[in-house]
Image (tube, helix red, strand yellow):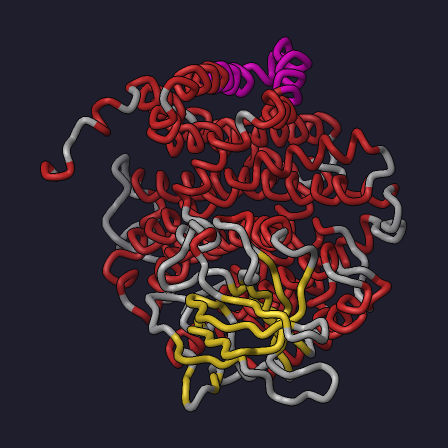
């Protein structure tokens, strides 16, 4: 049977010791977000995830969602779990108190997302999609729309969806065919088919609020002609049925307890959100929130897969250690004594702990971008979030699948067996590399939009703090074994940035060919930066004699492994970037 325990010690370390999350309490609206309250909320959330969501993860995978006559039934236990989830107020952790939310920082919600995804990724899809709908309406809706929809989304009585993709149209949303025709009363008749709609139909809530991309009759071609509409399953005024129907659900490799629907809109009544033909901006509000949420899915799956790999490695007895027997009282040593098992565990541990710090840093900056009283500070934080969003989405979802695969490998033959649970993590994790923009699209976003934006302003939001950290700590003897490899990797990242910018101006294919390697290189440098920050805190705590010495020593040892055994991949990525596009593009289609 699989196991999961929320990593609260590691979460608190990042929140308080590394990031100083309590400083958010100085921002307008966050006065109550003290360290004690953040810890209390996090601990209660951990109980919800461990005791309510995790026990129905495997059974939900086995049973899956059922579809009949346009209705979807979620697996046994999901309705009760959702009722407990909403009763605890977990749908509104970071939502506006004016509409019934807790009003806590987004960072707290980021922590919750990790734990929810570790415990039950399929379940997390339902409130996760509602968060995207909440964000779009709260930022772009009318006052009437906010009053109508936000309180119900916050309580969880109603849920939300994002209806973007169509059978012929995925990433290139300018090709959408769904139409919106004015009805003369301020509403629109929405007609079209959307596919891959997560939580498009289910039995957890009394209403489902669809956010639908469509084109008005006078819409210009391409993405400049996209508008966004709110289309409820049941009309809010009288709860009469709207013409928004589920045609079928997909039979999937993973996340089987999350209903992935084909949605048919047959002149369904909807209302415009934002301005006509300006739906792209509202769409990106949903997409960016969703991409950060998917990044946490990668981290959450990685954490629970690692925990299960570690538990098995400590328990499974096979052979003796290469340098002599370690457990003479047992018929064989546990497999954690073997170098390759330790390699897989340490790769997992070192990536997870740095990725958690990076994710929480992004979450904290999201709060600053929305609530800081100084406009310059808001802009700086917003730039950093924009830059790092494609990086954390892509890298952490790759990481989630990689670590789930390694957990299977650690389990040996048992890893391939459903009862042990880890093969489900690999199946669940795989989708996160695809939806909300494939990881290849994230890389193109990084090099095509973020790298060149505002004359490199986004890049400077990351490069400057890294440079300042290096300058401040490079003369510290205790930090040099960590600072030196990070500095070398950072210098090569800057070289790669200049090289791609130079080549990309002449030939965009060069930038595209380098994009995935550049994103991976960037992510590794970002993780190295997080490790250097964590090491400095750990060293200071050890020197002061505060806290758990073994905990801090483990941090330093894990950082050392990362610098020696994981970060060198950044050098290989740099060499791939230097190779250019020629060998990739010279192969004719008929030669594949």
Q: Is residue 261 above or below residue 217?
A: below
Boundaries of the magenta span: 464-493
Question: Residue sitting at 87 percent across and 38 percent down?
Answer: 373
Q: Nearer the viewer, residue 427 or 194?
A: 194
Q: Nearer the viewer, residue 100 or 249?
A: 249
Left or right: 449 with respect to 475?
left
Where the C terminus falls, by quadrant?
top left
Where the N terminus falls, by quadrant?
bottom left
Question: Residue sitting at 56 percent across and 41 percent down?
Answer: 389
- Quadrant location of residue 247? bottom left
- Image coordinates for residue 504, horizontal then vertical, percent: 41, 21
Question: Residue sitting at 57 percent across and 78 percent down?
Answer: 268
Left or right: 37 with respect to 459?
right
- Image coordinates for residue 87, horizontal then vertical, percent: 72, 77
Question: Residue sitting at 64 percent across and 40 percent down?
Answer: 362
- Quadrant location of residue 575? top left
- Quadrant location of residue 242? bottom right
- Image coordinates for residue 525, horizontal then vertical, percent: 50, 26
- Image coordinates for residue 94, horizontal then vertical, percent: 74, 57
Magenta segment's dominant SS is helix
Left or right: 80 with respect to 185?
left
Q: Is residue 7 visible?
A: no
Q: Nearer the viewer, residue 28 or 443?
A: 443
Q: Is residue 491 visible?
A: yes
Q: Is residue 427 above or below residue 580?
A: below
């Amino acid at each position: 049977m699989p196991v999961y325990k929320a990593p609260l010690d590691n979460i608190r370390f990042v929140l308080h010791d590394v990031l100083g999350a309590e400083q958010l309490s100085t921002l307008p609206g966050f006065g109550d977000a003290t360290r004690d309250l953040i810890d209390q909320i996090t601990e209660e959330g951990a109980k919800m995830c461990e005791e309510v969501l995790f026990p129905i993860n495997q059974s939900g995978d086995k049973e899956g969602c059922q579809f009949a006559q346009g209705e979807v039934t979620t697996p046994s236990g999901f309705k009760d779990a959702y009722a407990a989830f909403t009763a605890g107020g977990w749908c509104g952790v970071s939502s506006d108190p004016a509409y019934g939310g807790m009003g806590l920082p987004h960072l707290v919600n980021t922590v919750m997302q990790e734990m929810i995804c570790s415990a039950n990724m399929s379940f997390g899809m339902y409130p996760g999609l509602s968060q995207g709908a909440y964000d779009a309406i709260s930022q772009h809706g009318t006052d009437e729309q906010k009053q109508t929809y936000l309180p119900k989304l916050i309580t969880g009585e109603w849920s939300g969806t994002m209806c973007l993709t169509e059978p012929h149209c995925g990433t290139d949303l300018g090709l959408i065919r769904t139409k919106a025709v004015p009805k003369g009363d301020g509403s629109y008749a929405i007609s079209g088919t959307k596919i891959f709609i997560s939580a498009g139909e289910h039995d957890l809530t009394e209403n489902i609020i669809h956010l639908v991309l469509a084109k008005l009759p006078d819409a210009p071609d391409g993405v400049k002609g996209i508008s966004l509409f709110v289309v409820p399953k049941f009309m809010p005024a009288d709860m009469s049925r709207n013409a928004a129907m589920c045609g079928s659900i997909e039979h999937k490799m993973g996340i089987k307890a999350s209903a992935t629907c084909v949605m048919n809109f047959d002149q369904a009544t909807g209302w415009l959100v934002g301005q006509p033909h300006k739906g792209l901006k509202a769409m990106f509000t949903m997409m960016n929130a969703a991409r950060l949420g998917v990044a946490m899915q990668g981290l959450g799956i990685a954490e629970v897969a690692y925990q299960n790999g570690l538990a098995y490695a400590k328990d499974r007895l096979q052979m003796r250690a290469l340098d002599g027997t370690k457990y003479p009282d047992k018929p064989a040593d546990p497999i954690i004594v073997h170098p390759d098992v330790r390699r897989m565990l340490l790769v997992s541990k070192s990536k997870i702990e740095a990725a958690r710090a990076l994710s929480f840093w992004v979450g904290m900056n999201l709060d600053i971008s929305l609530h800081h009283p100084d406009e310059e500070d808001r802009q700086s934080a917003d730039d950093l979030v924009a830059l790092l969003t494609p990086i954390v989405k892509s890298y952490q979802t790759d990481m989630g699948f990689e670590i789930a695969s390694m957990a299977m490998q650690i389990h040996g033959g048992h890893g391939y067996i459903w009862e042990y649970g880890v093969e489900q993590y690999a199946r669940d994790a795989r989708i996160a590399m695809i939806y909300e923009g494939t990881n290849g699209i994230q890389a193109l976003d990084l090099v095509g939009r973020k790298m060149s934006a505002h004359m490199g302003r986004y890049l400077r939001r990351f490069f400057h703090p890294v440079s300042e950290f290096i300058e401040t700590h490079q003369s510290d003897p205790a930090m040099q074994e960590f600072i030196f490899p990070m500095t070398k990797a950072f210098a090569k990242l800057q070289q790669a940035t200049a090289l791609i910018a130079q080549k990309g101006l002449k030939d965009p294919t060069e930038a595209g060919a380098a994009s995935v390697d550049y994103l991976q290189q960037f992510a590794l440098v970002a993780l190295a930066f997080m490790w250097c920050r964590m090491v400095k805190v750990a060293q200071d705590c050890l020197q002061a004699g505060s806290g758990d010495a073994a905990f801090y020593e483990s941090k330093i040892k894990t950082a050392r492994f990362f610098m020696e055994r994981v970060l060198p991949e950044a050098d290989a990525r740099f060499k791939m970037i230097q190779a250019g596009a020629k060998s990739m593009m010279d192969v004719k289609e008929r030669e594949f």
